[in-house]
Image (cartoon, coloured by chain):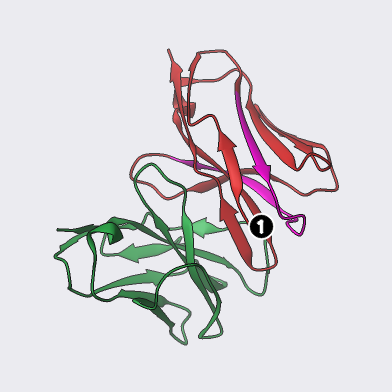
Amino acid sequence: DAGVTQSPTHLIKTRGQQVTLRCSPKSGHDTVSWYQQALGQGPQFIFQYYEEEERQRGNFPDRFSGHQFPNYSSELNVNALLLGDSALYLCASRPNGRRTGELFFGEGSRLTVL
Amino acid sequence: QQQVKQSPQSLIVQKGGISIINCAYENTAFDYFPWYQQFPGKGPALLIAIRPDVSEKKEGRFTISFNKSAKQFSLHIMDSQPGDSATYFCAASGTYKYIFGTGTRLKVLA
């Protein structure tokens, strides 16, 4: 049973560019959340997707957008990249329909913005 | 304001010692308090969690102590081992919300 998988694992972009990160949730999970983890910090909630809709959103600008597909996989898009967007981006999934409880994390996508 | 304050930021413990990490939360609507362990290059993984209807939960060498009135909870690692060296995050969760602490980098000396 595969866990949460994310791609790419590492990428380097320059300021102003756009990036798309991808996530496949753990089998049987339909709720996907995205987190930004800056170096030495805890994960910060970006948004959560359930039934292909954004259900909750953290304090992130509109440059951060996402999508969930019918197979529950998800994408995170960041436009007009800033140096401060350099971070580890984590995807987490949760068992179907649960409003709380354990999050299952992927290993993350390390984004460096130059 | 929804924050989870975690301390200390870093911790060095001798092998066999007790590691203690503390967290405090503000929102009384939270009803799930997990601790996650993260190794370098990996995503966080659930270590142990507690709900506010109990004051303590123990799983092997790991114990959560929970003080609902003070809105505080702590992780105790007994008989700390070098393999426990990692970053630990507390979190507080409620309906579709999940707030993480800033993390504690634990190093256990052999």
In the rendered image, residue A56 lying in the magenta stretch gets the answer no
Q: Is residue A60 left or right of residue A78?
A: right
Q: Is residue B13 above or below residue B68?
A: above
Majority secondary structure of the magenta segment?
A: strand
Q: Is residue B63 left or right of residue B104?
A: right
Residue designated by label 1: B93
Q: On the image, which quarter does residue B58 sit in?
A: top right
Q: Is residue B85 above or below residue A49?
A: above
Check the rendered structure and report the hue given to chain B.
red
The N terminus of chain B lies in quadrant? bottom right
Identified at 47% across, 57% down, the residue is A44
Task: Return the chain for callout 1.
Answer: B
Q: Is residue B80 left or right of residue B23?
A: left
Identified at 43% across, 85% down, the residue is A69
Q: Which residues are magenta?
A: B20-38
Please state which of residues A77 and B28 is positioned toward the viewer in this rendering.
Answer: B28
In the current view of this chain or complex, which residue is farthest to the front?
Answer: B1
Identified at 51% across, 68% down, the residue is A58
Please state which of residues A19 and B26 is positioned toward the viewer in this rendering.
Answer: B26
Which chain appears green? A
Provide the secondary structure element on which disc 1 rests.
strand
Mark 1 residue type: Ser
Q: Position of residue B15 (x, y in %)?
A: 50, 13
The C terminus of chain B lies in quadrant? top left
Please state which of residues B40 and A26 is positioned toward the viewer in this rendering.
Answer: B40
Q: Dot 1, how many residues are within 10 Å of its Cα: few (below 14), some (14-19), or many (20+)?
A: many
Q: Position of residue B65 (x, y in %)?
A: 75, 33
